[in-house]
Image: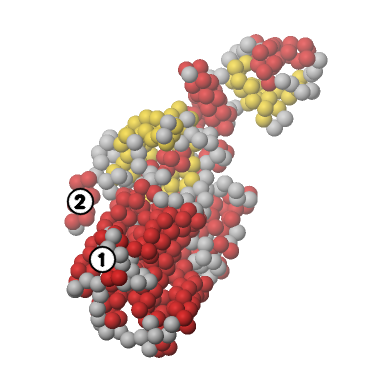
């Protein structure tokens, strides 16, 4: 129970210190909003096709970047060491930090979605599946950001490492076109990307249809990625603390 | 109840009963570099224990191991009767740490910093508010409660970092160079606070480069050189180790080359310049004085002042560190 409360305290402190700051909020919202507007201006009839991919991309970039930046900054300022000196487990720290980054990612995605609904007429067919997709995506991507951050010393190193992962993921995960229209040789590759399942969950939530026959397939696989990321983040964080 | 039983079962019983920290044959290496080699010592409950050594001796490595920030290679470590590797959370709940660099959250106010840490230490809302208020008052920071940590002076940052380490009333406080970089009044105020903390029954584990500070504050000290414990005891005991050889304080009328002085005086076994005088460790005083006078004559200078001095902890420290360094060079 104490450790659960500590997850909340760590998460609340990070939101207070970093994620509620105007520059971070505007960065998280402006980037996808401008991209969406550009796509809308180019072709107002089909712009919604890329909405699930764009929201997933917002989650991917926002969460991985912010989680990595926050931890790298705290390593440099010594405050991560301060946290490690308190009676909290490594898992608690990982969960608290991932939770705060996830809240940030979900909040910015929700703002984008509200904008799409109010200004461009997007409709949501299945809010439950959409919410699950946002939660699983935000959690997994935050944990990936944490894992990257403990492997490096500088923020730019974390970004370089993340980009090696993020850009191939964008290419293979159906962000800009559905997995269904991919060439046959890419389809099996796309199945190893967690982003694929998040995009398909959002697609199901917005359009009521996806590449997979049931949203539960995506939910189980995306949850699997979340659990694996969480399991990997703990030891990675522990090793970093021991350096 | 379950937690208490579990802790009880895991209690490490090395030897002795009044030791709050027990370390046996502790070893730690970073790659090929051996930071700690078979370090063994015990810290008694309620004392101020000085952990001294030159730069790179392994002091911070020891603290990091005792606090659970670093894993040891081999050896036994018990803090508050618990093995830090097996019960890191329980140990961290009983200790307070003031690292060499103040590391509270720069963007949070002083009050919020303490409240946040109070939350992580499991203090109730009421206890937290009281403790934060009391500590801000004790450390003379009440009017800085709403000031961000980054806006404080170095001395205030240090005081708040010490306050943060005391939030949960720890049994042991680790202070790593607490007065380093502080001006004289701030350092003096902090030393008084350390004595007050210890007066409340808290054990203090102190590392410092300031040997006068160690001599004034510590009940017992340990000297670490290149990861090895080379001396341990009260300040008096440590001084006693070098007092079998007398210390002469000599002032010459001109410049003197250290090596020439040592070479010309076989009865002198150590030579250190201290504040315009030469501190000479000698085995036989009369012979040494005769050799020093003869040396001065040959150099064409005069002996302006000569007298015996009582070895300070600093003299003893320098003697021990140099002897050990020489010994290790000889071994290699």
* Residue A119 image point, x, y percent: 43, 88
Residue B272 or residue B312, whichever sits in front: B272
Distance from label 2 to label 1 (Cα)? 37 Å
Q: Quadrant of the N terminus of chain B?
A: bottom left
Disc ID at residue B116: none
Q: Which residue is mark 2?
A: B6
Q: Going by the image, does B271 lie left or right of B296?
A: left
Q: Is residue A211 above or below residue A190?
A: below
Picture quadrant of residue B49: top left
Residue B322 in view in this figure: yes
Residue B122 x/y as whole percent: 33, 63
User: What residue did someone put label 1 on?
Assistant: A222
Picture residue at 58% right of the left edge, 62% below the top: B152
Disc 1 crowd rating (10 Å Cα; few below 14, some 14-19, many 20+) is: many
Q: Which residue does the image show at 46% across and 38% down from the upper left? A: B59
Q: Chain of mark 2?
A: B
The foreground one among A147 and B182 is: A147
Left/right placement of residue A101 relative to residue B311 reads left
Q: Residue furthest front?
A: A183
The residue lying furthest to the right in this view is: B300
Chain of the residue where label 1 is placed in the rendered structure: A
Q: Is residue B243 left or right of residue A2?
A: right
Report helix, strand or loop for mark 2: helix
* Mark in the foreground, 2 or 1: 1
SS type, badge 1: helix
Q: Position of residue A33 (x, y in %)?
A: 46, 78
Q: Is residue B143 above or below residue B155?
A: below
Residues behind callouts 2 and 1 on a single chain? no
Residue at 46% from the left image edge and 72% from the top image edge: A28
Residue A51 percent location from the top left of the image = 37, 78
- Give the camera-side residue of B124 and A131: A131
């Amino acid at each position: 129970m104490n450790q659960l409360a500590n997850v909340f305290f760590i998460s609340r402190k990070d939101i207070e210190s970093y994620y509620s700051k105007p520059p971070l909020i505007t960065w998280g919202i402006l980037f996808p909003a401008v991209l969406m507007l550009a796509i809308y201006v180019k072709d107002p009839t089909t712009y919604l096709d890329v909405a699930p991919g764009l929201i997933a991309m917002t989650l991917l970039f926002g969460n991985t970047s912010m989680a990595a930046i926050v931890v790298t900054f705290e390593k440099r300022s010594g405050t991560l060491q301060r946290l490690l000196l308190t009676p909290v487990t490594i898992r608690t720290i990982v969960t608290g930090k991932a939770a705060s980054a996830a809240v940030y990612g979900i909040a910015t995605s929700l703002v984008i979605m509200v904008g799409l609904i109010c200004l461009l007429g997007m409709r949501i067919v299945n809010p439950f599946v959409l919410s699950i997709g946002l939660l699983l995506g935000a959690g997994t991507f935050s944990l990936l950001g944490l894992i990257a951050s403990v492997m490096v010393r500088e923020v730019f190193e974390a970004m370089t490492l993340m980009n090696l992962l993020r850009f191939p993921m964008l290419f293979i995960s159906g962000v800009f076109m559905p997995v269904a229209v991919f060439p046959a040789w890419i389809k099996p590759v796309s199945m190893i990307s967690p982003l694929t399942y998040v995009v398909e969950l959002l697609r199901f939530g917005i359009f009521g249809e996806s590449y997979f026959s049931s949203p539960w397939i995506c939910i189980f696989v995306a949850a699997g990625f979340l659990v694996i990321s969480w399991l990997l983040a703990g030891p990675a964080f522990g090793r970093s603390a021991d350096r | 109840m379950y937690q208490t039983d579990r802790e009880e079962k895991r209690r490490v019983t090395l030897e002795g009963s009044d030791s709050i920290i027990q370390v046996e044959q502790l070893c730690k290496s970073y790659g090929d570099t051996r930071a700690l080699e078979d370090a063994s010592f015990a810290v008694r409950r309620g004392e101020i224990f000085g952990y001294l050594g030159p730069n790179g001796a392994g002091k911070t490595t020891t603290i990091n191991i005792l606090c659970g920030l670093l894993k040891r290679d081999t050896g036994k470590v018990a803090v508050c009767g618990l093995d830090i590797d097996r019960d890191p959370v329980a140990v961290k709940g009983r200790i307070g740490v003031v690292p060499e660099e103040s590391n509270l959250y720069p963007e949070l106010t002083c009050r919020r910093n303490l409240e946040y840490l109070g939350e992580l230490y499991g203090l109730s809302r009421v206890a937290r508010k009281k403790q934060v208020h009391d500590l801000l008052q004790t450390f003379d920071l009440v009017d800085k409660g709403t000031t961000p940590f980054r806006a404080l002076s170095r001395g205030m940052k240090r005081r708040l970092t010490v306050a943060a380490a005391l939030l949960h009333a720890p049994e042991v406080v680790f202070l790593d160079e607490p007065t380093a970089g502080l001006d004289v009044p701030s350092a003096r105020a902090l030393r008084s606070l350390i004595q007050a903390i210890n007066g409340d029954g808290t054990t203090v584990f102190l590392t410092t480069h300031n040997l006068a500070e160690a001599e004034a504050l510590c009940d017992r000290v340990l000297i670490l050189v290149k990861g090895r414990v080379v001396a341990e005891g009260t300040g008096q005991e440590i001084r006693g180790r070098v007092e079998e050889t007398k210390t002469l304080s000599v002032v010459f009328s001109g410049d003197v080359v250290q090596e020439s002085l040592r070479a010309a005086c076989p009865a002198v076994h150590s030579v250190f310049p201290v504040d315009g005088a030469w501190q000479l460790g000698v085995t036989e005083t009369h012979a040494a004085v005769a050799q020093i006078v003869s040396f001065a004559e040959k150099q064409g200078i005069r002996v302006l002042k000569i007298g015996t001095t009582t070895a300070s902890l600093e003299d003893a420290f320098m003697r021990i560190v140099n002897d050990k360094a020489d010994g290790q060079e000889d071994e290699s």
